Image (cartoon, rainbow, N blue to C red):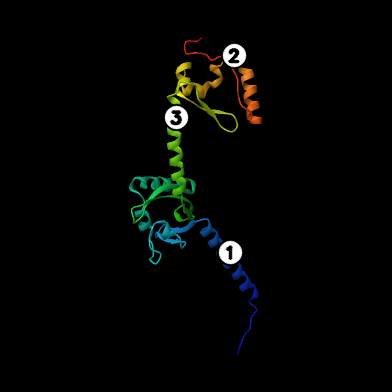
Amino acid sequence: MITVNDVTEKVEARKKVEDAEERARLASEIAEIVTWDLNIPTQELIYSDNLPELFGLQKNIKITRPQVLSRIVAEDFDLIQKAYEIALRTNIYKYEARVLKPDDSIAWIRVHGKIFFDELKNPTKMLGTVMDITEEKNRQEILMKSEKKFRVLADSMPQFVWTSDVMGNLDYFNQSLYDFCGITKADVDQNGWLQVIHPDDREENINIWMQAIKTGEEFLFEHRFRRHDGS
């Protein structure tokens, strides 16, 4: 005896799931994102194929969570513990830390995840992603070094140096201006930079500055500064 059933819908549904999983896998590989799934009670770790490479480990061996954590630089391990404590309160698990690879090279990773609880409010699992942000961190370090050199140079100049953001908000003054005016950065943060400009010159100063921001024209204006002795 033989029975025949039409399973077209089941096959098509399974194919859609497989296609969706394949698209998700390709998307994570293209974006160089590692995905992971952690069973908290058992500490069983399920991960995408590109996780071992991120930590400098072999692909053909099963990697456990303790192995992954063992690659974290010791000084950054407290960050992970604090991130987990925050996740227990907020559900959101995230941190940035350094990874020590077997060849002694250092990489930076960014972890984002979410923690799930059972009906008794016990943590059961975490899902998340990991990204290698080493290049981003290296660029930030180069930028910070460049900015530090700029500040050292600017602070050694007798001229007043200032910068602003793209909206025209002044965000930096060199030390010469603070010394001349007898104020501090905290004073500027609280009372604004116009306090050092003569009251009669302020309105025109602002108008010319805003015009320069809108048009990209050179900002050129002569006005009176208040010195530290009040003159």
For the point 42% across and 37% down, the residue is 145
The location of residue 174, given as percent across then percent down, is 47, 25
Given residues 77 and 231, the one toward you in this image is: 231
Please give the residue where the numbered disc 2 appears in the rendered image.
199
Q: Is residue 209 above or below residue 67?
A: above
Going by the numbered disc 3, the residue's amino acid type is Arg
The local crowd at label 1, few if under 14, some if 14 to 19, many if 20 or more residues have their Cα within 10 Å, is few
Side of 226 where 13 appears, left or right? right
The location of residue 93, given as percent across then percent down, is 46, 49
Marks 1/3: CA distance? 51 Å
Marks 2/3: CA distance? 29 Å
Side of 120 where 57 appears, left or right? left
Q: Are marks 1 and 2 in contact (CB under 8 Å)?
A: no
Please give the residue where the numbered disc 3 appears in the rendered image.
151
Decide which of tag 1 and tag 2 comes sooner along the chain. Answer: 1
Going by the numbered disc 1, the residue's amino acid type is Ala
Residue 88 can be seen in this image? no
Secondary structure of the residue carrying tag 1 is helix
Secondary structure of the residue carrying tag 3 is helix
The residue most toward the bottom is 1
Given residues 4 and 54, the one toward you in this image is: 54
Please give the residue where the numbered disc 1 appears in the rendered image.
20
Image quarter (top left, top right, bottom left or bottom right) of the N terminus: bottom right
